[in-house]
Amino acid sequence: MYASVRTGKGLKMATEELTMAAAVEPMVRRAQDARGVLTLTLNRPRAFNALSEAMLAALQRELDAIAGDESVRAVVLAAEGKAFCSGHDLKEMRSKPSLAYYRELFAQCARMMLSLRRLPVPVIARVQGIATAAGCQLVAQCDLAVASTAARFAVSGINLGLFCSTPSVPLSRNVPCKPAFEMLVTGDFIDATQAQARGLVNRVVEPGRLDAEIETLTASIVGKPRAVLAMGKELFYRQVELGMEAAYAAAGETMACNMMDQAALEGVQAFIEKRNPRW
């Protein structure tokens, strides 16, 4: 094998094999451990994991499959390479300049983002590098986020004459209005510590501790009853969009149903008996 690679013909064959291997490499890699922690890894590192149409479709397929898979207990959204996600694929967008195309593209992106919210399990963003525009939107749309100190965040479309309107939707639901609007109108980057202070990410650690921190968080989540987490996540986002009176009514109904669930019955009884619950 090594001898043939030294020849021109062998070198060409080896190059073609590498090209073919790269071509079949999935845009989104999927891995699930025995506990049900499923990791989706954005896998366009050379394109800074830009959300092309194909990337959005690949993510949608994975999320649709997860939605019906009761073996999944938590989802980690990770990325390969230096960037977490640089936003939409601007070269692809520029090659198809029509209002109908842009409407469909942003609708496709919105469907994927809403699918993250509708999953019955918590979704954790593992942010190892930059997250800009729709990439920052992706972080904001996840339920939780753990960031490396090397990560930076921006909704920088304004620098290109494009207000980050769709990223503003989850951003303004994570970050208070004034800091969110400042990010949107300046396009300036904030670092991971600033992102944590503004509520965009939950935890910030050194790069070498990122996976350990993700493990700590997922271990705590998978130790809780899946059905209760699903019920709680659905209620959490629903009540946020309601007025206070309606939110209390929705939350009270959910808690009443939750109290009749076997997980709560066992959990309360275990508390009374001063023992660990047997879920």
Image (cartoon, grey):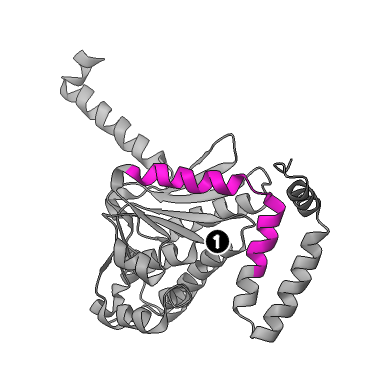
* Above or below 184: residue 9: above
Please provide percent x and percent y for residue 1. Answer: 26, 15
The quarter of the picture where residue 138 lies is bottom left
Tell me which residue sits at (19%, 13%) in the image. 3
Please provide percent x and percent y for residue 261. Answer: 80, 55
Please provide percent x and percent y for residue 237. Answer: 60, 71
Does the magenta-highlighted stretch encompass residue 269? Answer: no
Front residue of 124/102: it is: 124
Q: Is residue 163 left or right of residue 215?
A: left
Q: Is residue 147 left or right of residue 111?
A: left
* Above or below 219: residue 203: below
Q: Is residue 34 left or right of residue 31?
A: right
Q: Mark 1: which amino acid?
A: Leu
* Above or below 146: residue 20: above
Front residue of 167/192: it is: 192
Q: Judge the density around disc 1: few (<14), some (14-19), many (≥20) Cα neighbours within 10 Å.
A: many
The majority secondary structure of the magenta stretch comes to: helix
Q: Is residue 162 visible?
A: no
Tell me which residue sits at (40%, 43%) in the image. 211
Q: Which residues are magenta?
A: 209-235
Please provide percent x and percent y for residue 262. Answer: 81, 51
Front residue of 213/64: it is: 213
Does the magenta-highlighted stretch encompass residue 214? Answer: yes
Q: Which residue is mark 1?
A: 116
Residue, far right: 260
* Above or below 268: residue 131: below
